[in-house]
Each structure stands twice: as C-alpha cells, then as structure tokens.
Amino acid sequence: MTDNAKLIVDGKERSFGIVQGTKGERAIDLAGLREGGGLLTLDEGLGNTASCLSRITYINGEKGVLLYRGYPIEELAGKSSFVETAYLLIHGELPTRSELSVFSNRLNDSSLIHEDMRHFFVAFPKYAHPMGILATMVASLSTFYPVPDHLDPEAEEQFMANLISQVRTIAAFSYKKSIGEPTVYPSIKLRYVENFLNMMFSSPVKDYRQDPDIVRAVELFLILHADHEQNCSTSTVRLVGSSMANIYSVISAGISALWGPRHGGANQEVIQMLEHILATGTDPKTFIDRAKSRNARERLMGFGHRVYKSFDPRARILKQAYHQLLKKLKTADPLFEIAMQIEELALKDAYFIERNLYPNVDFYSGLILKAVGIPADMFTVLFAIGRVPGWLAHWREMVHAKEFRIARPRQIYIGPSERHYEPINSRGLKKCP
Ligand code: CMC
C-alpha cells in the first residue's frame, strides 16, 4: 500500500488503501468496505476488478504490451521455445541449461496416459468436439492419478508435468479418434512440438516428415498462447482451485471456460466465418455491416478485446509469421485475402474505431494452424495446450500465496421479496372481490 483513497460512505469518511503494481497500475483495496457499512462493490463482468495480486504476466492494453515474468512477448516469440516459456511462467525465471533439461526430460517421461484411458476414446461419438473430449479426459485423469490433499514440491512438479504433457497426448488421440485412425504413442526421441505433430499426423502406414517451418509455427502459436493474466479461463482456474479441488479438475474447468466463442473458441469461429464468406461470396463490407448490428451472434470474430484497446501484440506477431510461413511453404490461401480485406475495412470503420476494436490473437491464429494442416475443430484444443502452463502458474501462485482464501463473490439480490408458499390447488386462482 502506498497511498489512501477517502470515500464518503453514508455521510461518513472512510479510508481505503491504494495498491500499486510494478508498472504503476493502481487499485483501491475495498475488501473491508462491507464491514461497518454493509456496502458491496458491484462490477458486472468484472471489467474494473483486480481479483488478485500476481507476478506472472503484465498487459498494457492501451499500448499493446505483453510481458511474461517481465520478458516482452516479442523476445520470447523470437528466441524461446514453448517448453522454456512454460518453465519461465511456472518458476518465474528462465531455466539454466540443466534446469531445462530436467524439466524437458520430466515432460517426456510423463507423456503417456494410463493405457485403460485409451478405451474411453472408443466410447465418444465420432462427431464429438475434441474440446469436449479434452475437458472430460483431463477431469478423468484424477481417477487414474489421484492427487493427495497436500502436495510436496516434488509431487507438485510431477502433477504439473503430467498435465503439460498428457494434455498434448489426449489432444492428438482425440484427433485420431475423429478420423478413425489408431492412436500413435508419444516418443521419447522427439521434442514437445515434434512429438505432438507426430502423434497427430503419422500412422502405421505413413511416416510424418517433420518440417522445421511447421514445427516453428506451432511452437510460436503455443508460446503466444501460454498466458494472458486474468482472462475468463484463468480466472476460472483460480476460482475452482480456490476450493482446493484437485489440479486435474481445476484444469478441466479452465478448458471448459476456454471453449466458449467469446474466448478461445473464437479461433475456430474466425475460420468458419472466413469460409462462410468465401463459400457464399458475401461482400466483406456487407459482413462487417452485419457485425455492427446488436445481434450478439453476428459479431466480427477475432476482433475486440476486454483489455487491448490498441493492436493485440500477439496478432501482430502471428500475422507476420503467417506471411513468412506461406512464402516458405510456397502456398496461398484465399481465406487470407478475405481476412486482410476485413481487417482493412474494419480498421477504417467508425464503429470499430470508436469502440477500439482491433484484431485479437484469434484473428490470425486459425489461419496459421490451417496452413500447418491442423483441422479447425482442433484450433481451440491447441490454444488449451498452449495455455496449460499459464493456468498452472496461476494455480501455483495462488495456492502458495499467504492470503489464499476460497473465492466467493457476493451479489445484489433483485428477486422477489419474502413471500409464502401456496398449495398447488390454490395457485393462479383469482381472489374473489
Ligand atoms: N464485433 C462487433 N462488435 C463488437 C465486437 C466484435 N467482435 N466486440 C465488441 N463489440 C462491440 C459490442 O457490441 C459493444 O458495443 P456497444 O458499446 O454498442 O454495446 C462494444 O463493442 C463493447 O463490447 P463488449 O462486449 O462490452 O466488450 P467486452 O470487453 O465485454 O468483450 C470480447 C470482449 C472479446 C468478448 C468481444 O470483443 C468479442 O465478443 N469479440 C469477438 C469474439 C472474439 O474474438 N473473442 C476472442 C478474444 S481474444 C482471445 C481470448 O481471450 O480468448
């Protein structure tokens, strides 16, 4: 606390501490407001609420800045690997060579799922969305790998490694299920991303040839999605984790929150939107005009962000990487042309300008995944694989915090006042005058 804010509550002056963050953000600590006055704070959608203190990720939405543990996302995207970034997010520092090797080996050693779990895949319908499978399978990991109430540091490391590694295996198995091919086991000889691509695309009758440009594109995608402070799924992870639920249930809850089209599900919706425009020959301008109507389902997917009020830095990096990838793969995609037209039109349109709506990470991420051969219904699954280290970092930060309490927001009740039970026969009967 560095300062105080004075509030006049019911005619009485009260003083509340102001908390200041490393980069100058300030918040009034109103935790004690209810005591001695009965007042709550109301902030629907939590747009103005800092729900915790955190050392993990910093965003400046006005300037388009994103730092993981202080490191600019542009530097990590250009120089780091996903596994190294995961270590950084969880442990707070970049690893030494030997720390990275221990961490990497642990991930590799933890990549199998219990063999009996493979039977579960058979039971899902063929058309099952892989996000539904992922959430279910991650929750069921807790039945095969029971989590003790108190985790010592070694057990905590192991459960986190299990999650980072097994989520990737489950993701690939669910894809194989959807195309009717046998599952491919993870290999101790392959690194994190290569392993995933091999499990996705090799089969008993076809080897998968690793292309370093494709590996790098997926690596970049995962790094850019690894954390984003208190978004909907991370807040879900903290909320569910605050009840001391087991870590698998916590991450499964995060996956479910991520699936929604306003959050991670937007990456699949962007491609569907672009494909729809292409297939129907809709003029992008007409599409944008429709997106300006108040019909929520018609929003321009991949645009807008609660925190970024200028360009999302992740979208900028992905757009550039996508350009380079198309050149290297010597290919083109008509969806990219449509995406560029939409971006150009929207950025000049008063509606989008007034509301500070810019392309977000999901606008270009689907295009890059499409270019490397990932099917659209796996896009949000890849987002989840990328976000697991961020969720774990937040869970770990919370459970080790000194002032860790169950998250339990309040509400303002606006329903009927107290009334009394009427027997069913007399309900709805008009009272005689
Ligand atoms: N298209 C058209 N209008 C929009 C859009 C959009 N994509 N996004 C926001 N608006 C309008 C909205 O209708 C509202 O207008 P008005 O002031 O006239 O009522 C205004 O902009 C503010 O919108 P909001 O819903 O209050 O903003 P929010 O901060 O609650 O929502 C958002 C942020 C990301 C949910 C929203 O911008 C959106 O639905 N975008 C499309 C879905 C999407 O791309 N989601 C991915 C987000 S980034 C990755 C991630 O976090 O997963």
Image (cartoon, grey):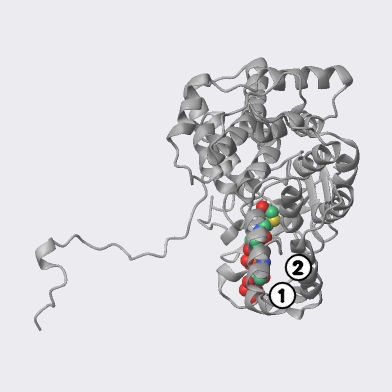
Instruction: Name the kind of residue labelled 2 in the image.
Output: Ile
Instruction: Tell me: 124 left or right of 151.
Output: left
Residue 55, horizontal then vertical, whole percent: 77, 38
Residue 88, horizontal then vertical, whole percent: 80, 31
What residue is pinned by disc 2?
338
Q: Secondary structure at mark 2?
A: helix
Task: Tell me the residue at 69%/75% (across/down).
Answer: 288
**Residue placed most toward the observer, 272 or 421:** 272
Residue 417, horizontal then vertical, whole percent: 32, 65
Instruction: Tell me: 40 left or right of 229.
Output: left
Crowdedness near tag 2: few (<14), some (14–19) or many (≥20) residues, C-alpha within 10 Å:
some
Ranked by sequence position, the earlier of labels 2 and 1 is 1
Crowdedness near tag 1: few (<14), some (14–19) or many (≥20) residues, C-alpha within 10 Å:
some
**Residue placed most toward the observer, 148 or 17:** 148
Name the quarter showing ligand 1.
Answer: bottom right
Numbered circle sitting on residue 370 = none
Task: Tell me the residue at 73%/72% (across/down).
Answer: 355
Q: Quadrant of residue 397?
A: top right
Question: Disc 2 vs disc 1: Cβ atoms closer than 8 Å?
Answer: yes
Instruction: Name the kind of residue labelled 1 in the image.
Output: Pro
Q: Quadrant of residue 186?
A: top right
Residue 168, horizontal then vertical, whole percent: 65, 32
Instruction: Tell me: 249 left or right of 46.
Output: left
Task: Tell me the residue at 16%/62% (across/down).
Answer: 422
**Residue placed most toward the observer, 86 or 136:** 136
- Asked if residue 45 can be seen in this view, the reply is yes
Image quadrant occupied by the N terminus: top right
What residue is pinned by disc 1?
284
